[in-house]
Amino acid sequence: MRVLIVGSGGREHAIAWKIAASSKVDKIYCAPGNAGIEEYAECVDIKAMEFDKLAAFAKEKEIDLTVIGMDDPLVGGIVDVFEKEGLRVFGPRKNAAILEGSKAFSKDLMKKYNIPTADYQNFDNPEDALAYLENAKYPIVLKADGLALGKGVLICSTLEEAQDGVKTIMLDKQFGESGNCMVIEEFMTGREVSVLSFVDGKTIRTMTSAQDHKRAGDGDTGLNTGGMGTFSPSPFYTKEIDEYCQKHIFQPTVDAMAAEGREFKGIIFFGLMLTADGPKVLEYNARFGDPETQVVLPRMKTDIVDVFEACIDGTLDKTELEFEDNAAVCVVLASDGYPVKYDKGLPVRGLENFSGKHGYYVFHAGTKKDEKGIVTNGGRVLGVTATGKDLKSARANAYEAINWVDFDNKYYRHDIGKAIDEAN
Ligand code: AMP
Ligand code: GLY
């Protein structure tokens, strides 16, 4: 089989590694890819939003399966373009990717189908939003409706902050067109858990749980980032909670999308908050999480290509997912200054130390190859994942392995997975 992956981050590196492990696959391409993905795939210089070029490439190379890693192309309708050309592709169509592409849509869907989530109101103009805020309870959460690189959520402690937030999102349009519409939502407290799942339109199979660390600094301080590290499984996501979520959140979401004529095939990523009133949905994503994928796939035993095919063919009910009874921790190595301002082009040393080390992975998030070799090319540079028999040993292994690789200005959080100590 010949497979094309669309994307260029640590998530796509992990997907490429997992696809390469399938006995069915002879050749992998990745567009545009990165310096790490090159180990498994031939990287092609086509951008993720160049749908026609990508489809033409897939035809020319007789690609049997294309896997879309990123949200922008999915929300933009890449799957529809590929399907129209008769190409096999894994991911939701545009009318289903809206589950991630519009927070107002997803909130209305949850309300209509009684899926537990925070109370909210949608607004399409700043005057109504500002009037609503006068009598609201604080803290309160403001969300730009559309995609905003994970940055379109503002948690506001006071009326003044919230008024500024409305200005940022709807008037100054800091997140562009994403801010044409806005959700104002009740602030929830609790543990956050990410649950990724495969969906074939009717059947859903969830993967093992994970938890992300979104803030830049130790102790969950500093700015929000794309994710500074993850661990899997989450000790807070118990069997009991899983049963509740399967019944009240996961299957109902798949059924709701089907009932709306928006059959969902692909990955649904459930961002959950475990509140005192039970688990509630924080957000949906229509793709693998980054860096959740970097801890979930190294624990997955099932051939991922079989699962992709089952989703496309609608036969997921005949497929069981299997995961190792172990744990994984991923520590992101960033360039100091991320997510605001940071240098690029710094040589990366020591990558070879990972070769042949079972249970250790270095996934590239932002790297490229130049005349100096592999250099940094983004704020998040690498994700170092290690497995272990439990979270504690996976964590120790990951923090050992981050010393094997180096670049100037290397920055990382010291407390990825530390919350697990509280659980034990
Ligand atoms: P989202 O992109 O919707 O997941 O939001 C990003 C982050 O903002 C989440 O991971 C939470 O930490 C936080 N957040 C979002 N919605 C809420 C909420 N209703 N209450 C508390 N925190 C929230
Ligand atoms: N780690 C959060 C995300 O992928 O959106």
Image: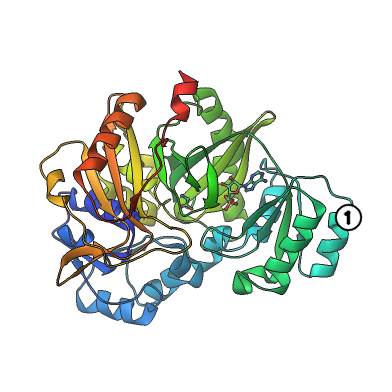
Q: Is mark 1 within 8 Å of ligand 1?
A: no
Residue 55 vs residue 156: left or right?
left
Q: Is residue 302 visible?
A: no
Up/down of 98 relative to 206, above or below: below
Q: Is residue 115 left or right of residue 51?
A: right
The residue wearing badge 1 is 134
| Colouring used for the render | rainbow
What residue is drawn where x is 60% and y is 43%? 252
Q: Residue 378: x, y in percent?
A: 35, 63
Locate the N terminus and report the quarter of the image it occupies.
bottom left
Relative horizontal placement of residue 117, taking residue 354 as reference (left or right): right
| Element marked by disc 1 | helix
Identified at 45% across, 31% down, the residue is 234
Coordinates of residue 207 in the picture (x, y in percent): 40, 39
Identity of the residue drawn at 53% across and 52% down? 224
Residue 168 versus residue 260 in the image, above or below? below
Q: Quadrant of the C terminus?
A: top left
Q: Position of residue 353 (x, y in %)?
A: 13, 45
Residue at the left extreme?
A: 356
Q: Nearer the viewer, residue 233 or 221?
A: 221
Q: Quadrant of residue 36?
A: bottom left
Return the residue nearer the eye: 288 or 311: 288
Identify the amino acid type marked 1.
Answer: Glu
In the image, residue 276 sits, relative to residue 35, either above or below, namely above
Write down the quadrant of residue 161 in the picture: bottom right
- Locate residue 300 relative to residue 419 in the image: left or right: left
Q: How many marks do you count on the picture?
A: 1
User: Residue 134 placed where, x, y %?
Assistant: 88, 55
Nearer to us in this view, 390 or 409: 409
Please rate how many residues cluster around mark 1, counting C-alpha atoms within 10 Å: few if below 14, some from 14 to 19, many from 20: few
Toward the front, the furthest residue is: 408
